[in-house]
Structure formats: C-alpha cells, structure tokens
Image (cartoon, rainbow, N blue to C red):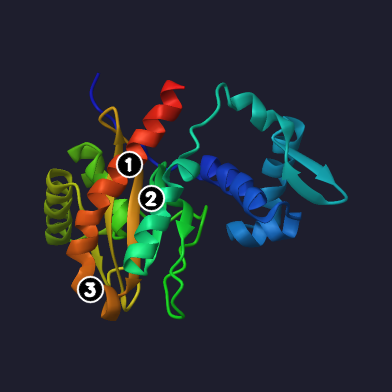
Amino acid sequence: MPETTAKAHRTVSRVTDILETVAQHGGARMHELAVALEAPKSSVFGLVKGLVSTGYLSEEKGVYRLGPALGNLLTQPAPDIAGAVRPSLEALRDEFGETAMVGIPVGDSLTYLASAESRQPIRYSAPLRVRRPLFPPSAGKVVLAYRTAKQRESYLRTLFDNEDRVRSAMAELAEVRASQVAFNHDETLPDLSATARPVLVGGRLSAVLAVAGPTTRIEAHLHTIAEALVDATTAAAERLGAQSAG
C-alpha cells in the first residue's frame, strides 16, 4: 500500500486535548477546559459528556477527572523510560552543570518525561508532560530524523510555506539521522542552546536524551556534551532493553 502521512483531525485533537488537560491538572471544570482548548463551552460540552458516558472521564461536583476506562487501553505495562534513564540524566547534569532531560514522541509532538535540573541559579527548566513541536527543539529534530522522508517533509510543510526553508530543514534532518546528534542554537528561545541524541533499543527509537542551558554558558561545550551523550544513550538503551527482556 502507498505510504500515507498522519493528519490532525479537529474532533480527535479536541478529545485528546481534553484528556491531557485533565491529566495535567488532576481535574478540571467545564469552563477551564473551554479556556484550555480555546473553544466555546458549547463545543466542549458534548465531547466531555461523551467521554463521561464511555468512562474515559468521571465527574464529581462539576470537576472532571480521568476515568477507569483508560485502564482498559493498557494491555501490558509500559516501559519505565523515566526510571531507566534517570541515572544517565543525573550523571550528565553533574558532569556539565546543565539540565538534562528525556523526551519521547507523542504523535506529531515531543513530550519530556523527566529531567535532572541544573543546580545553577540561571538554568533551563524543561516543561514536563507538555506537548512541544518536533522542530526546532534538538530532541524533536531527533524524532523527526527517525521518520521517513515523506513524513518529515509533510510535517515541515505545516510549519513553513517557504520552499527553501523546507529544503534547508530536510537537509539538516538528514544530517541528524546520519550523525545521530542534533543541535539547537537559540532556535526556540533567546539564549537557549541544546544538543540531543537518540536512545535506540533494537534499532528503534525509544526516547531522546538532551542537555540544554543558556547559550552564553553552554555553547562552547555543546560538542563535548554531544560526545558524552553517546555513552549516556547507550547506557539508557541497555537498561530499557533489560526491562523489556524481563
């Protein structure tokens, strides 16, 4: 069959946004969900009540929380990625004094599961369990690099309408795939740079390790950090592989 690329669907996106908002806040009221989704309460109301009726949400005194039906989707325990990479994150943080984090692909987004924050007063604090774009964060570039060329191009065209910009990004992602390292030089926030490498288990992308910090402090060390990430991702992959084997 010909290869197809995933496309966002408005209703599906709203349903997943509702579930993720409730999960992130431990519960939410109808008006809070409408604000979070930037949608009329009337549009959100039917979706929320439908999720309650199917058990994916529960309601108590006007507060909606995750429901028991979500447990039915988990046919087997998920690998404890955060636990497996924690030693690597802390070792990177202690060696370089900057924030280290682990991210995973979530659809066409990147989500950080855990971090070991720098102890320095001025540092990068990675937002956990919040969807982030796949480009231009360094960890997101790694995720995109491990997708097919058609999938990469399709995603990039949702960001850029300039053909030269798409070609430039495609070339960068090809280099990321070949070298297994990505960089971010002030592309997401002013004075923030980072580097990232894939955690490969059985040749498949399981997670991404990244280190980020103020450009004025980290820029001169990015390539050294990238080299250290080779051992860190190898160790993380071994621990994840042992989890799967067990």
The numbered mark, 2 or 3, whose residue comes first in the sequence reads 2
The x, y position of residue 239, in whole percent, is: 39, 35
Q: Amino acid at mark 3?
A: Glu
Image height check: is 3 above or below 175? above
Residue 107, by quadrant, is top left
Q: Amino acid at mark 2?
A: Ser
* Left or right placement of residue 89 versus residue 12 in this view: left
Can residue 64 be seen?
yes
Camera-side mark, 3 or 1: 1
Can residue 206 be seen?
no
Kind of element beneath mark 3: helix
Asked if labels 2 and 1 touch by Cβ distance under 8 angstroms, the answer is yes
Point out which mark residue 235 bears: 1
Q: Residue at x 49, y 43 (%)?
A: 83
Please tell me which residue lies in front, 95 or 140: 95
Please tell me which residue lies in front, 132 or 128: 128
Q: Residue at x 73, y 54 (%)?
A: 28
Asked if labels 3 and 2 touch by Cβ distance under 8 angstroms, the answer is no
Distance between the alpha carbons at the discs numbered 3 and 1: 25 Å
Q: Which residue is mark 3?
A: 219
The x, y position of residue 38, in whole percent, is: 59, 61
Distance between the alpha carbons at the discs numbered 1 and 2: 7 Å
Q: Is disc 2 surrounded by few (<14), some (14 to 19) or many (20+) residues within 10 Å?
A: many
Point out which mark residue 88 bears: 2
Q: Residue at x 43, y 80 (%)?
A: 122
Point out which mark residue 147 bears: none
Please tell me which residue lies in front, 50 or 26: 26
Q: Amino acid at mark 1?
A: Ala
Kind of element beneath mark 1: helix
* Left or right placement of residue 70 versus residue 125 in this view: right
